[in-house]
Image (cartoon, coloured by chain):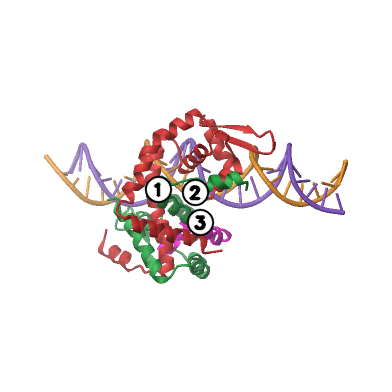
Chain colours: A green, B red, C orange, D purple
Amino acid sequence: MSKLQHELRQARPFASPMMEAYLNLQRTADHLRTEELRILRPLGLTPQQYNVLRILRGAGTDGLPSAEIGVRMVTRVPDVTRLVDRLEAAGLVERTRSESDRRVVLVRIGKKGLELLAGIDEPMKRMPDKLMGGLGAAELRKLNDLLVRLRGAQD
Amino acid sequence: MSKLQHELRQARPFASPMMEAYLNLQRTADHLRTEELRILRPLGLTPQQYNVLRILRGAGTDGLPSAEIGVRMVTRVPDVTRLVDRLEAAGLVERTRSESDRRVVLVRIGKKGLELLAGIDEPMKRMPDKLMGGLGAAELRKLNDLLVRLRGAQD
DNA sequence: GGATTTTGCTTGTTCCAACAACCTTTGTTG
DNA sequence: CAACAAAGGTTGTTGGAACAAGCAAAATCC
């Protein structure tokens, strides 16, 4: 990088501490998400698909309505239908229409889905350990506290 | 929501404090990004396009090579070319091939792009103030510190 | 100073994200 | 109990994200 470019980058000020925090948060989240992508890509899963599978595993054999999946996801997803479509096409989940309320479609994780998850668990558990090893327990608690309050603050 | 569903959600444990921090970070980042989307959508800009325009405004009248834009962006972007394509098609930026190095394409922000940015500056400045108002100055500094260390830790 | 490598960008392609409109089933209300 | 509203999913469509392959100009290397 040239000297000029370096100076420009150093000189770029943040408009406010809050804007700095906002950009910092996006930058860090993207950084970590890239690492998650790297783990999931060889398995043909996106982070969202992985998220759905984990939710369904936690829900047990009864399955969950599509709408409830959307509510529980880490990131907002406006189209659970086609997200589940792809998982179904891959043979990882099954769909059955509820008998008690025929509007509802229950989604359940299948055997193949559970096996796939089992193989991801270990590397996925190691990922945050590796990326967040620099922070101590107290700092992690503080970070979680701040993040939760950030989400709750705007109401 | 049913009683059972509520209990399930309460009962979901995190595998580790680090995994909790990871998910929390993604959740919060998505939450804030949604707010940014809400501001930019009426103007037909994505957060990334907005990011490029800000970078180009900061770069001045000389413009920047495409590759340097990619380096400076908040989130990792593997395809600056078509990102700039769309901005050029919208008449917001111009491309000129560098004379000194004919491989390089310099991108400059145009009059229309500057005017568009000027209109966004105010609501965009208010956004983090509104979303992060719950945190004090010291807490913001702490948050920024933790986020920066998170990014630096994995090397 | 010609072959090779490297750099900077473009193009091809496939899949996913986002918003809206629509359809079916259930609940509600006078 | 018929008309209407609401809930739950699906489909249509457009545009963006991601990875790879390719092309032209510049740097490197005997």
Q: Secondary structure at mark 3?
A: helix
Q: Amino acid at mark 1?
A: Met
Q: Amino acid at mark 3?
A: His
Residue A31 numbered tag: 3
Q: Are marks 2 and 1 on the same chain?
A: no
x, y percentage for residue A110?
46, 64
Q: Nearer the viewer, mark 3 or mark 1?
A: 1
x, y percentage for residue A111?
48, 67
Lower position in the chain sequence, tag 3 or tag 1 = 1
Chain of residue at mark 3: A
The residue at which mark 2 appears reads as B74
Residue B58 shown left or right of residue A98 in the figure: right
Cα distance between the residues tagged 2 and 1: 12 Å
Cα distance between the residues tagged 3 and 1: 18 Å
x, y percentage for residue A132?
47, 66
The residue at which mark 1 appears reads as A19
